Image (cartoon, coloured by chain):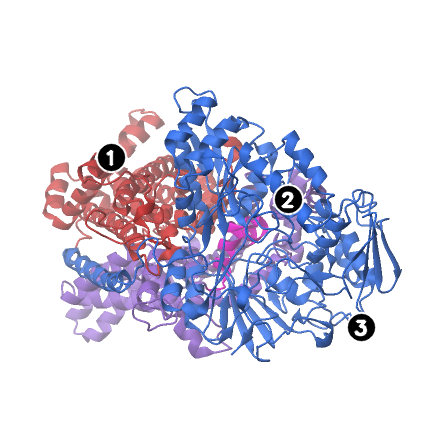
Chain colours: A blue, B red, C purple
Amino acid sequence: MLSRKAIAGLIGAVLIAAVVAACGSSEEKGSSTTPKGEGLTESGGFKTPATESLTSGKKGGKLVVLQETEFEHLDPGISYYNLDYPVVFATQRPLYSYKPNEEAESTPDLAAGPPEISSDNKTVTVKLKEGIKFSPPVNREVTSEDVKYAFERGKNPNVANPYEEAYFAAVEGMPAAKGGPIKGIETPNKHTIVFHLTEPKGQIVADALVLPLSAPVPKEYAAKYDKNSPSNYASYEVATGPYMIKNNSEGKVLGVGYFPGKSLTLVRNPNWVASSDYRPAYLNEINYKIGGTVTVGEKEALQGTNIIDQERPPQTIVQEAAEHYKEQLQISPGAGDHYIAVNNKVGPFKNADLRRALWAALDREEMDKVRGGKLVTTVQTHFLYPGIGGFEQAGGLKGPAGIPYNENPQGNMALAEKYMKEGGYPTGKYSGETITVVGARGAPASEDAEIVNSTLQKLGFQTKLSLPESSIAYSKYCNVPKEEITVCPSVGWIADFDDPQTVLNVTFNGKFIPPVGNVNWSQANNPKTNEMMDKAESIQGKSARASAWAKIDEELVKEANAIPFDWDKQANVEGTQVLGVGQLWNSGEWDLSFTSLK
Amino acid sequence: MTISGIEPAPAGLADVEPLGPGEVVHALAPRQLFWRRFRKDKVAMVSGIIILVEIAIAFLAPVIVKVLGLPGPQVQNPNLTNAFGSPLGPSFSHPFGVDQLGRDVLTRTIYGARVSLTVGIVGTLVATLIGVTVGMLAGYYKGSVDTFFSRVIDVVLSIPPLLLALGIAASCSVKACAGGTIQPGVQTVIFLIALITWPYQARIVRGLVLSLREREFIEASHAFGASNSRIMFREILPNIAAPVIVYATLQIPLNILIEAALSFLGIGIRPPTISWGQMIASATPIFNTAWWYMVFPGVALLITVLAFNLLGDGLRDALNPRYAR
Amino acid sequence: MTAYVIRRVLWGILMLVVVCLTTFIIFRVLPTVNPAVLRAGRNPTPQSLKAIEHSLRLDRSLPTQFYDYLREILLHFNFGYSYGSNESVTQLIKERLPATISLTVGAAVLWIVFGIGIGVVSALRRHSYTDRGAMGGALLLVSAPEFWLGLVLLFLFSSSIGKFKILPGAGTYVGLTSDPWKWFTSLLMPWFVLAAGSAAVFARLIRGNLLEVMDEDYIRTARAKGLPEKRVVRQGVRASINPVVTLMGLEFGVLLGGAVLVETVFNIPGVGRLAYESISSSDYEVIEGTVLLAAMFIIVANIVVDIVYAFIDPRVRYA
């Protein structure tokens, strides 16, 4: 085949063309690159949910929402994932919920007014609004029975709500319930629901009523779906909020308004009455497009008109948006945190000095940089995060005083070796069996995992790093104590509602280490902090709670039960014609019930 | 699907024609003749040299990186990303730019050659070994042995190769498979490649053996009372060696591409082991600006695969001049 | 002929069962992960795990599980349910099928037209610059990884992130019926990427075949007898394409595999991306279903090809 002789020239030509095209672009980008550390301050003059107007929207229009990750659960009884929440809160009305620009005070939603907590702190009574109806095909008025059923089905193994145990265990009969009636929940009349508690934990129970579990579910309609294992009520779910997932006359949403991995359509709920709700619900229709590459989606949103993206943009997009599309970028502060979980129960990190050594050695700035740098992250110094009660008492941005290993965010190897020596390794390097590190695939988790891995190696650890898909990494490894994973390099947490207990209790209290689904990833089981937390659960009043939990926070830092590195901020991008409203109380996604078109 | 008598060439190898009985004669031509022809083929020679250079690079990666004054493959440097965490592009000290962790892309591209070549070559060797054994047995014994193996081959070939690989990789990527015999990573990928490609080799060998065993010199050996294994190893094997090597050479680039595809989809090679496909995968989230991270590993892949293809073509032409036109 | 067809079909059915067994082993026996854990999602509780194990029949013996699995497939064409969305696998695949058909059929047309066209032209203009350029380009395309080629094209030409914003990029696919023009333009790059490799393989193959055929005695005789060159070439082309037909079935399998990569890179909501997504989320029932369906498709395609081939070349039937 003589023809092959022509190939060398051909390859050359193609390569040159590609390189020329590519170089052109690099010059264009290179000139506008911001030098390191310049021009980036806390929220950098960007839009933030705290300053946005909630009432100046225009009614009408269709919005396209891009989301590259599939929903996990849209069933209000199961949903516990930040990307599910925008849909859940646009379609469901829990007893209480947050306005987008509020993170401390919730607003009565299905409830008619604030919860009444008895003086002994053992009874919580909530009155429901009248005249709120379920969407078609149920069409009837919501009663307290529907809220009661929502709580009951949460304990049904086919539904298995992931947080009911953590916040509502004090409700009488709750721990043993399997889906049937719960003794401590009473409905004296159609619009009143009463929670009777066995312990004085009224405050936390009342606060937790902002979670989607408290959204009503019609028993006569849902029970047949809840019999399936797992329940497929989500495929037929009805709404109480301003929007509903498009459905057919039987109520089926799966294959009608929701095509897994492809699209989800939200339309107006015809039975929703605007006067009963604080949500303006400007948009007429919301079309989710699911799947694809985040980079491409974010770029489409920046270049488009009536389009938004719900995902965290990668660093190159944040940079481009900050430099060229400043008006279309919003930064929401206080969107949770990320830390390294180190196994406190088995392996080398039983030893607190080794945990301190890792903390001292870690370059937290580098960890944050792969997440997008200072615009969207803050170096974390303790566990409570900005905006949560107790944050200031625990030391604010600088963190608790007098913790040497917390002082250098770029890492300090000399100090780290000092702790290694104190921990019983006279050379300053670890010597012992190989440890397992389970990160998650995909940016930025995999990058963080590689930084942690190389930091561990610098300390002398032999590591076995694996990076499965994030859902596997958690459900199979990091959430399963029996697997004895030594390090999970970037576990993330976001408060369920504004209370320091929601940040620290299930994640560090030794009493919450279930065999599966464990989120006390470090398996911290420190008698002193356990006791402090058990006491603090029953404390009344915001400021008292804040200072009690701040002390626990300090104690966790001293014990280095986990190694924190990033207080997240959420960057959101929107098209030119969108008046996006992000929220403060959760991880900062666009709130679909407040976003409008210009 | 097999149609007895007419062997379709395997997909991907499609341009390698099954050799007819007459053509085997060329394969038997003296080695010098083959060499003389091959040496004249400049493109193939250059490709062969490129491959040798690549193998040398893979072996000497640490030395080369040191000589070029580049940082090691796992050296992270946060100063090489900007304030947003976007990596910086090509510069004098980092000719191929850096990745999100500030690691040198040239260094990593050099190290990536190790995995691609290992997987491509070892995977092909394993597949060839299985393919030759099965093909030999089926072609030599014919009858029920042949039927059995042919049917097994049919089944494997009826599942789309990439989907089969994806399926098994997905099953094995979390923890080791089959009681720990298949570990995730390079081992899994080699296993997968062998699994999905051996039938092609087996079919070709079977065809060759079928036609060879009817020829006089084999019959003569039988007549002299040579054992079956002696005939297979001493008489048949040398005669099919040349075409088998050619097919194997042409299979290597395909296997390199399979590894790249699996790693790109996240179920092949995983960090901290470096592979070109996996580099391209981690470049995808930032490829709107950081083109260098996507382009250079891809070009390395392209050159390697192309070189193997050209070398394979050249070997085939030298072996079978009737085909070279 | 009838006997041959019956034999082929019966063998095809047996193979389907064997393929079912293979996928069952791959997805139920090989993995060391409990599927119930995967199904339970990010925050499972011990109770939900137990319930799921029971409902997935994981507490039964493997042969029973296989029997159930096979029965569901054969009697109800039921491939199980997605762990994530509870949607039936058949339904999921049905929704994704139009996009994959659009992609693969379009690519197959490109592949066959360009493969044969370029192969014939190259052979007839042997050693010309056209021939060298075409064959060089073909080799380059065979050597380029599909996913990378796709990314490079997106980087260069897509309207969202491209340097020359001339074609709709990733995620712009719409159904044929909703907007034919947008459907067409959004598929241009994916078609090219998917077809490139196969077309190149075919072009090289046909060029080789045609060169060989044109040297055959009967063609020389035809020429010598003064048959018009056009008819001589037509004869030759027909003869050189025949052996290629059998390869199409196999090549279609390669195309389906390629669809996984191309749909992922271009974000086309097809079966390939479904397979990839379900692999990412370890949604085994869905992967199993897609693999099985693809295998069925290939088996059927091969039967069709074999029968067609038997018509073209009667020798086959008696072999």
Decide: few, some or many residues near mark 3? Use Cα within 10 Å; few <14, some 14-19, many ≥20.
some
Inspect the image, locate mark 2, and give the three-letter code of the amino acid beneath it: Ser
- Tag count in the figure? 3
Question: Is residue A565 within the magenta segment?
Answer: no
Answer above or below: position of A541 versus B122.
Answer: below
Earlier in the chain: of badge 3 and badge 2, it is 3
Instruction: Tell us which disc is closer to us: 3 or 1.
Output: 3
Q: Chain of mark 3?
A: A
Where disc 3 sits, the SS reads: loop
x, y (%) of residue A502? 64, 47
Please give the residue where the numbered disc 1 appears in the rendered image.
B62
Label 1: state its secondary structure: helix
Pointer 3 residue: A131
Q: Amino acid at mark 3?
A: Gly
User: Mark 2 highlights which residue?
Assistant: A547
Task: Describe residue A502's horizontal placement relative to residue A95 as left or right.
Answer: left
Quarter assignment of residue C211: bottom left
Residue C180: x %, y % from top left: 45, 78
* CA separation in Å, label 3 and label 1: 74 Å
